[in-house]
């Protein structure tokens, strides 16, 4: 009996001392180098303790394959923080709860939120730490005034394939005659002569049409004025006869 009691006591003490192991992985999308390991920091801090031991504060040891492990975590609540000099890592902070049964649950802590309120966004275990999708790399130096090829209307044209194609077509159309004249002057001279002949033919055709229209207008005017000319002598003879009659009456 005493031996079994001692064994149970030792097992409980060992379980309390050993605790649970938390396993995670740093995934940069490629193999880790010594440079990556030296510029990455993943550590754990105990914020709620259920025992009388000192609060845990450890730094993870990254292996070449990116895995890390925090051993012998006693029941309580921990905060895991991941930071890198080169990358914006996600999750930046995570809450880890260890139950008395050595069950581990991890939760994502959104930026600006308190760790005590972050018990809704569960993280799958083993937890993966990876660069942020929108801005994976950190920028420490930012130029105040970017060049013409990076901002402004020229950059808009260069970065937009549709605008760039339009500009190329306009330049080609503008320079094509000069290029053709330089490469084949006889052909360009012939094209210019043909254009002049076509222009002359068009002008002569238009002048002929104008002449025909004027002739039609002149014939119409002459036809309208001929009846008026015929009526004018008759009226003149009538007035002369009337005047002779009046003079005869006066003589009588």
Image (cartoon, rainbow, N blue to C red):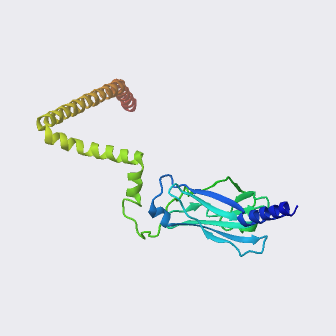
Q: Position of residue 183 (x, y in %)?
A: 14, 39
Q: In the rendered image, is residue 138 in sight?
A: no
Q: Where 124 sits versus 247, above or below?
A: below
Q: Position of residue 146 (x, y in %)?
A: 40, 65
Q: Where 197 sits versus 99, above or below?
A: above
Q: Residue at x 25, y 28 (%)?
A: 205
Depth check: give the residue in front, 70 or 223. 70
Q: Residue at x 76, y 71 (%)?
A: 49
Which image quadrant for residue 104?
bottom right
| Left/right of residue 51 with respect to residue 129 in the rendered view | right
| Left/right of residue 201 with respect to residue 145 in the rendered view | left
**Total numbered circles:** 0
Q: Position of residue 90 (x, y in %)?
A: 59, 59
Quadrant into which the N terminus falls: bottom right
Which image quadrant for residue 176?
top left
Q: Where 39 sits versus 28, above or below?
A: below
| Left/right of residue 151 with respect to residue 136 in the rendered view | left
| Left/right of residue 136 with respect to residue 151 in the rendered view | right
Q: Residue at x 18, y 31 (%)?
A: 194
């Amino acid at each position: 009996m005493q031996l079994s009691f001692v064994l149970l006591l030792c097992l409980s003490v060992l379980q309390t001392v050993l605790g649970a192991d938390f396993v995670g992985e740093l995934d940069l999308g490629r193999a880790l180098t010594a440079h990556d390991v030296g510029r990455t920091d993943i550590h754990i801090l105990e914020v709620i303790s259920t025992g009388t031991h000192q609060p845990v504060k450890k730094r993870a040891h990254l292996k070449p394959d990116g895995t890390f492990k925090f051993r012998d975590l006693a029941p309580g609540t921990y905060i895991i923080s991941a930071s890198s000099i080169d990358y914006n890592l996600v999750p930046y902070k995570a809450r880890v709860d260890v139950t008395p049964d050595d069950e581990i649950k991890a939760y994502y802590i959104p930026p600006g939120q308190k760790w005590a309120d972050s018990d809704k966004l569960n993280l799958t275990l083993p937890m993966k730490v990876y660069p942020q999708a929108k801005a994976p790399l950190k920028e420490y130096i930012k130029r105040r005034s970017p060049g013409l090829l990076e901002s402004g209307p020229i950059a808009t044209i260069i970065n937009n394939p549709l605008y760039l194609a339009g500009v190329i077509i306009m330049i080609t159309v503008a320079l094509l005659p000069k290029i053709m004249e330089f490469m084949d002057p006889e052909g360009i001279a012939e094209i210019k002569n043909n254009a002049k002949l076509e222009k002359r033919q068009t002008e002569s055709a238009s002048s002929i049409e104008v002449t025909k229209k004027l002739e039609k207008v002149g014939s119409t005017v002459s036809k309208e004025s001929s009846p008026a000319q015929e009526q004018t002598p008759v009226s003149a003879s009538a007035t002369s006869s009337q005047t002779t009659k009046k003079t005869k009456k006066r003589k009588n």
